[in-house]
């Protein structure tokens, strides 16, 4: 009895593609999930490739070119990461400035209260 055919095709990736994906995922500012999304593969597959690389199952070759779409996605992702970091820094600076403004307002209130203007009745 022949096996059931589901119509699904298993995507085959070249060794060069796997090597480049592993190299990208090892860069400090990139995550496995981010690289996997950019390459349109499942993060578990990339993790498996990383494990196979550690075990020496495929030779590490230097790949000259990566798929153009993947490069564009990686660049966009890097830009998004940079912008998110910048937003976070600006929000932190904004909070510091708000605290400083509150501090200055409090200091002004203290000075005006101690200046001798305690008589509030005008009659």
Image (spheres, rainbow, N blue to C red):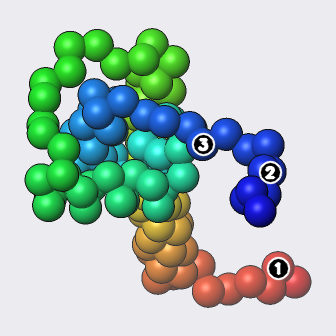
Residue annotated with mark 1: 122
Label for residue 99? none
Residue sitting farthest toward the front: 1
Disc 1 from disc 3: Cα separation: 89 Å
> Of residues 63 and 99, which is closer to you in this image?
63
Query: Contact, CB < 8 Å: mark 1 with mark 3?
Result: no
Image position, residue 95 (x, y; %): 49, 61
Image quadrant holding the C terminus, namely: bottom right
Disc 3 from disc 2: Cα separation: 11 Å
Query: Contact, CB < 8 Å: mark 2 with mark 1?
Result: no
The earlier-in-sequence mark between 2 and 1 is 2
Residue occupying image coordinates x 27% and y 44%: 22
Image position, residue 84 (x, y; %): 48, 44
> Of residues 11 and 106, which is closer to you in this image?
11
Residue occupying image coordinates x 20% and y 14%: 64
Residue annotated with mark 3: 10
Per the image, label 2 sits on a secondary structure element best described as loop
In the displayed structure, would residue 22 be above or below residue 61?
below
Q: Of circles 1 and 3, which is in front?
A: 3
Residue annotated with mark 2: 6
The earlier-in-sequence mark between 1 and 3 is 3
Image position, residue 71 (x, y; %): 41, 21
In the displayed structure, would residue 78 be above or below residue 65?
below
Judged left or right of residue 57, residue 109 is right
The image quarter in which residue 11 lies: top right
Image position, residue 119 (x, y; %): 68, 86
Q: Of circles 2 and 1, which is in front?
A: 2
Q: How many marks?
A: 3
Residue occupying image coordinates x 80% and y 51%: 6
Residue occupying image coordinates x 18% and y 52%: 57
Residue sitting farthest toward the right: 123
């Amino acid at each position: 009895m022949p096996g059931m055919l589901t119509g699904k095709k298993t995507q085959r990736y070249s060794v060069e593609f796997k090597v480049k994906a592993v190299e990208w995922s090892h860069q400090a500012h990139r995550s496995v999930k981010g690289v996997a999304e950019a390459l349109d593969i499942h993060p578990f597959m990339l993790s498996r490739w990383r494990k196979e690389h550690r075990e020496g199952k495929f030779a590490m070759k230097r790949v000259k070119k990566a798929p153009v779409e993947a490069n564009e996605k990686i660049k966009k992702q890097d830009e998004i990461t940079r912008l998110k970091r910048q937003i976070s820094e600006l929000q932190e600076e904004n909070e510091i400035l708000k605290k400083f403004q509150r501090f200055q307002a409090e200091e002004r209130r203290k000075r005006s209260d101690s200046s001798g203007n305690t008589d509030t009745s005008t009659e």
